[in-house]
Amino acid sequence: MKFATEYLWFETRKQREYINITDKVAQIVQQSGVQEGMVLVSAMHITAAVYVNDAESGLIQDIDEWLEHLAPFRQDYRHHRTGETNGDAHLKSLIMHHEVIVPITEGRLDLGPWQQVYYAEFDGQRRKRLIIKVMGE
Amino acid sequence: MKFATEYLWFETRKQREYINITDKVAQIVQQSGVQEGMVLVSAMHITAAVYVNDAESGLIQDIDEWLEHLAPFRQDYRHHRTGETNGDAHLKSLIMHHEVIVPITEGRLDLGPWQQVYYAEFDGQRRKRLIIKVMGE
Amino acid sequence: MKFATEYLWFETRKQREYINITDKVAQIVQQSGVQEGMVLVSAMHITAAVYVNDAESGLIQDIDEWLEHLAPFRQDYRHHRTGETNGDAHLKSLIMHHEVIVPITEGRLDLGPWQQVYYAEFDGQRRKRLIIKVMGE
């Protein structure tokens, strides 16, 4: 059985960004030599997400506006009594989820035609980390 | 270590449908011969979801109405400038998530008494695919 | 290849509770002897969730209020025609999701500095079960 573990670092210029990491995940899977298995892609922070969806810039703006509608920035989150200002980023992360598992078949990410793996940053402009763990044979 | 990979195809009659696929997943696990492990059940499209919840028809209607409330059909999604009309289906998919992992113990899906695996279609009336990957011993 | 399967039981005093189970998951991973792999932590009921986020009490209250806003208690859910009164708990569970996968590296949960594993109960005051399945080498 084979395992490979890699960490990616991000430091986005904007507070919220959506970064297509499909090629990076595919490359790590290829380097692992795993032919059959799964790869876990998981944010290591609680104000970021990893999701699978479309690489269409209009849709990404729709997602961003929709998340701001469902989990808006507000001054009065209780979490802000700690000095933080990112309560909304925690809630956005919870809707979108912090991780995905992508199946590996015949050495490749077994994704549908439009499926892309995204890192979603909701509290950027600081260094944030993500783990990619490949597991299989 | 054993792996099994199967693809299910759906072409729903309605635009939105909720299909109980628990028996199909269980059958694929049984055929794989895996006694201990996990099975990934993952939509291969970005306007569908896979989730675990109750097989109660009233609840499924509640879920459908609630998703339409949180992620409504609208004409003015930016995504629609591409010619698409399914922006809401992407957002519904993101709330519900496109995949689950079900544990396998003693050769069976290790689900709680009311847990059923559902495929949720949000942009149907076309052929859509789902991957089931069993991994274990 | 090694597997370990444990079940945790909860019977919360309140209807909704958020319980940090990180230490318990870490202990089960340690006892399994797995050095590289993944651990699945999955609620076995359809009115509970498992998620990874911050152990900050203000934020947990924010999450609870936010979930009540997005998936409120209502008398008129169709699900209540069955005699149930917990329609909102199903919807809260769907937003938050019933499971997470945590990577295991060098025998430890490979979590970021603020990531904690939580069991979220949305329909408590009764016995509920959760499965923890460790898989790796």
Image (tube, coloured by chain):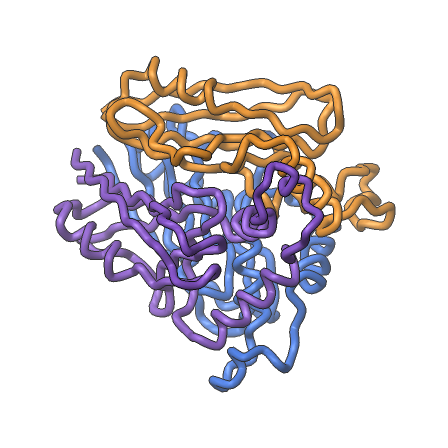
Chain colours: A orange, B purple, C blue
Residue drawn at (46%, 30%) of the image? A41
Q: Position of residue B14 (x, y in %)?
A: 44, 63
Closest to the observer, B2 or C114: B2
Note whether A134 is above or below A28 in the view shown.
Answer: below
- The residue at the far right in this view is A75
Seen at 27% across and 41% down, the residue is B133
Q: Can you tell which quarter of the image residue A102 is in?
A: top left
How many dots with numbers?
A: 0
The quadrant holding residue B136 is top left
Can residue C9 be seen here? The reply is: no
Q: Is residue C30 above or below residue C106?
A: below
Residue found 57% across the figure and 29% down from its top: A119
Whether C66 is drawn above or below A107: the answer is: below
- The percent position of residue A39, horizontal first and vertical second, equals 38, 30
Q: Measuring 33% from the left and 41% from the top, which residue is drawn there?
A: C134
C76 with respect to B57 (left or right): right
- Residue B53 percent across, percent down from the top left: 43, 63
Q: Relative to residue B95, is residue B54 drawn left or right?
A: left
Q: Which quadrant holds the N terminus of chain A?
A: top left
> Which residue is at the front of the view, C101 or A61?
A61
Tell me if residue A2 comes above or below residue B38 in the rendering: above
Q: Looking at this view, is B55 or C20 the one in front?
A: B55
> Quadrant of residue A35 in the image?
top left
Position of residue C38 in the picture relative to residue B6 (left or right): right
Viewer can see residue A80:
yes
Residue with the most extreme top position: A31
State the quadrant of the C terminus of chain A: top left
Left or right, C27 with respect to B68, comes to left
